[in-house]
Image (spheres, helix red, strand yellow):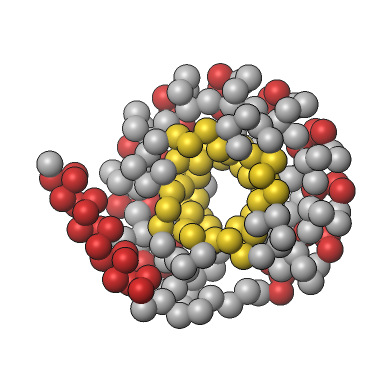
Amino acid sequence: MRKLALFVGSALLLIQVTASAQDFVLYKKHDPKKDPNINPFLNKEINPDTTFIINPNYNWNINPIHNTEVNPTTNNSINPIKNGDVNPQVNEVLNPIFMKSLLPANPSWNGLYLFNGKNEVFGYVSIASQNVMICFDNSGTWNGYFVRANNSIYNYFTVLGIWTGMFLCYDNSSGYNLFDKTGKWTGMHIK
């Protein structure tokens, strides 16, 4: 019951903080519209549809469906429900309600950007630790987090710690590509 009260209180505080959030500035070094090197639609080396080594449908080492070591349903160390060290609901150091520097609206925020298939900003990603990245929607509202499974993969969880089946794969260059639970690239990418 105490955890539920903490969660509800945290959610209300986050809504209040993001309601007054300023417009976010997109830095040139992260903008795939201005830099073709980080644009997976122009740079075939970071596009999983043209580079099979970074495509989980061809490289099963980076596919949680086929590799139990990177699947949180079979590996408790990367499952936030089983491992509180990677769960922002349990670990306050990872929780953006307590760690205001993780919020994209914070003036000192330094994070990554989530782009949709049109290279438009779709959300924000804060690096909370080497194993956890916090995800925010376009308005700056906390909507989930990524937990590192190995050097190339992060699994995506809801705020409550439920694995969505979605996951990030490193593009071997400048960021990550987001895949759905079937291993298909969503067109979304993080820079």
* Residue beneath the point at 45% across and 34% down: 163
Compared across the picture, whether 81 is left or right of 166 comes to: left
Which quarter of the figure has residue 80? top left
Q: Nearer the viewer, residue 70 or 40?
A: 40
Q: Nearer the viewer, residue 142 or 102?
A: 142
* Residue beneath the point at 65% across and 57% down: 116
The percent position of residue 162, horizontal first and vertical second, equals: 39, 36
Q: Is residue 27 visible?
A: yes
Q: Is residue 169 visible?
A: no
Question: How many numbered discs, if any?
Answer: 0
* Residue beneath the point at 71% across and 30% down: 56
**Hey, which residue is sitting farthest front in the picture?**
118
The percent position of residue 52, horizontal first and vertical second, equals: 82, 33
- Say above or below: 138 vs 64: below
**Hey, which residue is sitting farthest left in the picture?**
1
The percent position of residue 40, horizontal first and vertical second, equals: 79, 53
Q: Quadrant of the N terminus?
A: top left
* Residue beneath the point at 58% across and 77% down: 25
Compared across the picture, whether 5 is left or right of 24 comes to: left
- Say above or below: 4 vs 102: above
Which quarter of the figure has residue 66? top right
Q: Quadrant of the C terminus?
A: bottom right
Q: Nearer the viewer, residue 7 or 175?
A: 7
Compared across the picture, whether 40 is left or right of 123 comes to: right
